[in-house]
Amino acid sequence: MKASVIYRPGSPEEFRLEERPVPTPQDGQVLVNVKAVGLNRSELMTRKGYSPGVRFPRILGIECVGEVEFDPSGQYAKGQQVMALMGGMGRDFDGSYAEYTVLPKHLLHPFQSKLPWDLLGAIPEMFQTAYGSLYPALGIQPGETLLIRGGTSSVGMLATQLAANAGLTVLATTRNPQKESVLRENGAANILIDNGTLNEAVWALYPEGVDKVLELVGTATLHDSLRCLKPGGTGCMTGMLAESWAIPDFAPMEFIPATVRLTVYDSGQISSPTAVFQEFIRQVESGKVKLAVSRTFALDQIVAAHQFMESNQGAGKIVVLP
């Protein structure tokens, strides 16, 4: 099989396309024929060496969709459509930048769909992150106001649709005025051009502040985002588009406004059942939700795919088709 392997942290050029034996699943594992892989900023961080505990060489890729090739237990028939995400993929063990991958059975979500693989490949982590941030973490309710910082990221665009469909008024941000129309098409009621300081622009629209904030840019803008909340409001730190894990010299009593709540989305603590993924796929099939795939790449174009991801040119999910 073909696999894209990285032997040391560094630039996209560190990826090497190799021919490797198809791995053999052990007890509790399933061999999956990978049909599509969504790219994620966290893989960029891992590639650069910022993910603790990752040993190289490694096949990256924290999510995939595909078909079961072989399940030693017989639980899944060959050809069963499955998706998988996180759980150590591409970090603790080899991930999905390959034609085949062996995955722990508990990571699999079986599903049925006639959607094309590029659309299905955009779903697992993007949906899980958006849904997990909005519902378990933020606890959104109809009638609330929600600021999504990093609105033109793939998660931001989907979160905008989900929140708008749930009856919230969404304010979404972008640094690029040319992307305003994309945000409006996804259901944003207000578009804010992000220059690093938003609180005054938010207060001009909502003098008391907003009910909820979904922070996708990261630690660089989190303090300002929390200042956009009304008393009793909640902010969720989810993304790291700014490529920083930590807040230097973090002093909670100075950083977090009084009566404002700060939570996080963590895929290790928040997950969705298989039925939720299947229902979301039905919404995509019906046209209720539209998925934005920015570009697709072949497996032998992983270098170009990572370069495109780093350029921030796209508006939507980047998908690799092995």
Image (cartoon, rainbow, N blue to C red):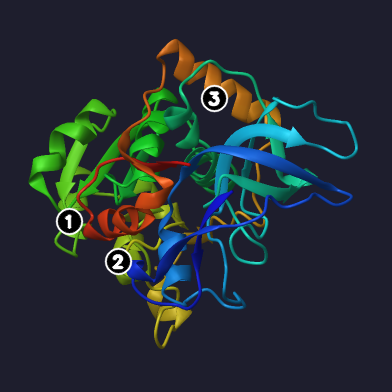
Q: Nearer the viewer, residue 91 or 254?
A: 91
Q: Which of 290 and 220 is in front in this view?
A: 290
Indicate whether 179 appears above or below 275. Answer: below
Disc nearer the start of the sequence (2/3): 2
Disc nearer the start of the sequence (2/1): 1
Residue 59 appearing in the image: yes
Disc 2: which residue: 221
Task: Pinpoint residue 98: horizontal percent, then vertical percent.
Answer: 55, 50
Instruction: Report the residue at 20% width, 33% height from top.
Output: 182
Whether label 2 touches label 1, CB < 8 Å: yes
Task: Pinpoint residue 143: horizontal percent, then vertical percent.
Answer: 40, 29
Task: Pinpoint residue 96: horizontal percent, then vertical percent.
Answer: 57, 50
Q: How many marks?
A: 3
Nearer mark to the viewer, of 2 and 3: 3
Residue 260 appearing in the image: no
Indicate whether 276 appears above or below 14. Answer: above
Q: Residue furthest left?
A: 178
SS at mark 1? Answer: loop
Disc 1: which residue: 194
Occupied quadrant, residue 280: top right
